[in-house]
Image (cartoon, rainbow, N blue to C red):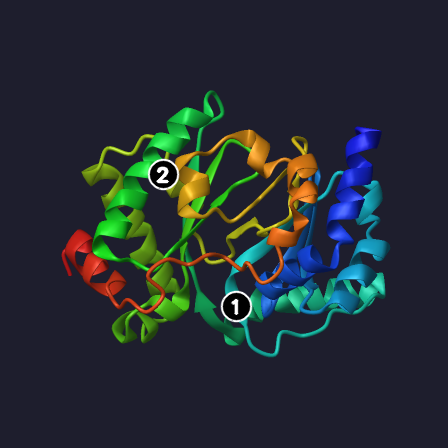
Amino acid sequence: MDEEFEKLRNKWYHTDSVSFEIIKTMKYKESVFLKKGLVIRNLKIDCLMFFWKNTERYHFFEEDFNLYSSLAQFKNMPMFSFNQNKKREQSDEWNINFKKYMVSYDLLLDFDSEKDLNFAYSDTFRVKEIFDKRKIPYNLKFSGKKGFHIMVEYKHFPIWMKEMDYDTLVNTLKEFAENLSEKHKLNFLDKSIIDIRRICKTPYSVVYPYYFVALPLSDEQFENFNLKIVSLPYLLENIDNIKYRGLLTRHENSNTFGDMVKEYNNI
């Protein structure tokens, strides 16, 4: 760990405007602490008190954990015990019955290039152009590593998609991503990651080992993207611009996503 950046990381998470935005995005979702060799799932973090308790319990700020959230939302998700044996029992039950609690599932398009961020950027730019032209409601963020995420939230799905069971919905979204990639020759869209337990980097979280932030990007920020604007020093200097910023969803009131799915999936 880089001691200087660890101080910045702690300052970032303990800034009220930042923690406010992070908790907003984790509400009703399964939260996950993840680092190489260790995955801690089944965390319910929908308020600051639960966040701080779990970070303390699992030594989040002493370890190189990344913060993830599920693509699904869950109604009345149980609070897991802090007793290790009890939590294991609850987790086993949850892993079997989690679908009973599901109330939504978002589409995530993950563009990633280990060799060159510009490759992922080009594919993301292409899809962004298509979505903007069609007025698809989406948000876009830097993944914190080597790529970008475009997300369409469940609330923007048409009724006929919301009437699907969740396994069918996930398969429909996976097919859409595959067809989108094939039609537009997208080489850096990861199509293998769409599954019902899928998690992704939590917006506004700090990503190891780079110390960049998984930052939702405005059109201007994306069009003029450089790593400086997602760095901890820069963002802490411009912290006043964070609170109430949200996910920056475009075309919020548009109902066009269902038509695009029908077209690309030949429904």
Q: Which mark is residue 73?
A: 1
Q: Which mark is residue 234?
A: none
Q: Is residue 214 above or below residue 86?
A: above
> Residue visible at 69% across and 65% down?
45
Neighbours of disc 2 within 10 Å: few (<14), some (14-19), many (20+): many
Q: Is residue 244 above or below residue 125?
A: below
Between residue 206 and residue 173, name the one nearer to us: 206
Between residue 10 and residue 149, name the one nearer to us: 10
Can residue 110 be seen?
no
- Amino acid bearing label 1: Gln
Badge count: 2
SS for tag 1?
A: strand
Residue most extreme to the top: 115
Question: Label 2: which residue?
Answer: 124
- Amino acid bearing label 2: Thr
User: For the residues marked 1 and 2, what is the alpha-carbon distance in whole angstroms?
Assistant: 25 Å
Neighbours of disc 1 within 10 Å: few (<14), some (14-19), many (20+): many
Q: Nearer the viewer, mark 1 or mark 2?
A: 2
Residue 27 placed where, x, y %?
Answer: 60, 68
Can residue 251 be seen?
yes
Q: Is residue 41 left or right of residue 169?
A: right
Q: Are marks 1 and 2 in contact (CB under 8 Å)?
A: no
Q: Is residue 69 above or below residue 215?
A: below
Q: Quadrant of the N terminus?
A: top right
> Residue visible at 49% across and 25% down?
114
Between residue 190 and residue 215, name the one nearer to us: 215
Residue most extreme to the bottom: 76
Q: Quadrant of the C terminus?
A: bottom left
Residue 212 placed where, x, y %?
Answer: 63, 36
